[in-house]
Image (spheres, grey):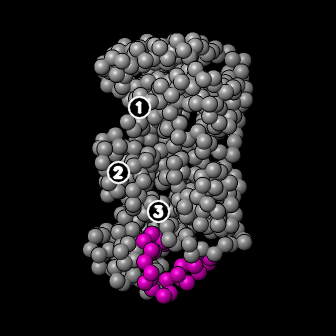
Amino acid sequence: MSLPVISVQQMREWEQATWAAGQTEKEVIARVGKIVAARVLQLTSANEKILILAGKGHNGDDVRAALPHLHEHEIILIDVLDAKNGLEKFSLACKDARKPKLILDGLFGIGLSRPLNDDWKKFIAAVNEKNIPVLSIDVPSGIDADTGEIRGAAIRASATLTLGAAKRGLLAATAIPFVGRLEVALEIGLTPCPFSSELAWTMPEDFLDFPPAREVSCHKGSYGHVVIVAGSLGYHGAAVLAARGALRAQPGLVSVFTPENVYQPVASQLQAAMVHPWKSVKDFPESTTAILFGPGFAANDLPGNLKKEMIELWKQSPLPVVVDASGLDWLPPVKKQFKTLRVITPHPGEAARLLSISTEAVQANRVAALRQLSARYGNCFVLLKGHQTLVGRSDGEIFVNSSGNPFLAQGGSGDVLAGYLAGLLAQPGLQSDAAKTIRYAVWQHGAAADRLSRESPNWNVQELVENLGRAPQRWGETPVER
């Protein structure tokens, strides 16, 4: 049930269809108020001070509708009728020694299409300067929800709870620093969304029945055998982390092939995986059902035949192949579309190298970069990592991941994801809907980081491995970094 990413005009049409079906604006606003209040309660503790900034329009109505459900908190409501008056009230509210724990931003909604005047710029600057966590409702005030343009100034939110569906402008590179963590409140009382789009927003509920339950009479042969070719001198940890990630996916078997000069440190850290010194692909088990190569291929003294055999495997293997990290730089462009499953997992810098453009160009239009990468490499699946990781191919839907946080920016995080993904794709029952399996791997990886960030401020990658697959598959259990 991934959601389309829609325009402001489409949102307006959706609302009008809802009113025509008999639902009222008043009923939807009341429901939104409950949802907003529930999110505030998750982000705060009882008796903490909440400052609500309510504008003139429906965005202000949405945040005011949360008030009846926040009786355990100290609430300061500022009805901002004009910027000068609002700034005075805001300054007074923040002079108290007990400053607010959260600001609820309901100043401007998706209808803003004009530049803000100097008074509004001063007001918004004052809010941002306080460094108090902000939960913006529908859109951070000051952002054009269609284009992502900053209309002179914008609230810098810790998180944005957008209503009904994600709006296109909230995914724009210009908007991301102000949006913070983007969350979608789906069940706000509108009729089913009548639109589809190139971009689809992943919801936790997409995976409520995934992976499917295992048969009671199964055995390890039922769930595949993933082969991981990884590691090199100085980078053997990548092989270990990829293997541990794969084991968390629970395939039947995991085999690791690593250069002989790092065989001992890799093998000594793995118990459930079988570890072999690299010689040739001829040594791969006949039972192999998926292959991952690339993590930790950063040393200069890799075995002479390794690159040649991995390239040939990429071009010819009938099995699913996942390529990560340094292995990406080995890939030759492929003119014909692959008939078998291929997945590449670049971060923006790697994507830039593969496309011979700048990282800034990749980030400015991540969708175009993904399309170009997939077309260049045989219509393979591309998992373009980063904030709101994208999953897709040269045509069809591109899925935007909704989980994860900045603490995933640690060495080894990508190795864990690559292993976890390959461990899932090795399982025959998960290969038929490869897009869903890839999306699930990405979402669980991010959701594990979210869980850890709720529990500990300084978690590490090994803890990430241990939490893979444990995330609750429902909306609303995600952190806002303070």
Specify whether 475 is left or right of 138. left
Marks 3/1 in contact by CB < 8 Å: the verdict is no
Residue where numbered disc 1 is placed: 131
- At which x and y percent is residue 28? 58, 18
Write down the region rendered in magenta: 293-316
Give the quarter of the figure containing the C terminus.
Answer: top left
Q: Is residue 57 above or below residue 6?
A: above
Residue drawn at 28 percent across, 70 percent down: 269
Q: Nearer the viewer, residue 152 or 155?
A: 152
Residue drawn at 50 percent across, 67 percent down: 324
Residue where numbered disc 3 is placed: 418
Specify whether 70 is left or right of 310. left
- At which x and y percent is residue 97? 30, 19
User: Dot 1, how many residues are within 10 Å of its Cα: few (below 14), some (14-19), or many (20+)?
Assistant: few
User: Of marks 3 and 2, which one's residue comes earlier in the chain?
Assistant: 3
- At which x and y percent is residue 410? 39, 56
What amino acid type is highlighted by mark number 1? Answer: Asn
User: Of marks 1 and 2, which one's residue comes earlier in the chain?
Assistant: 1
Q: Is residue 401 above or below residue 283?
A: above
- At which x and y percent is residue 407? 39, 49
> Cα distance, mark 1 to mark 2?
31 Å
What amino acid type is highlighted by mark number 2? Answer: Asn
Q: Nearer the viewer, residue 307 or 435?
A: 307
- Secondary element under disc 2, as helix, strand or loop, is helix
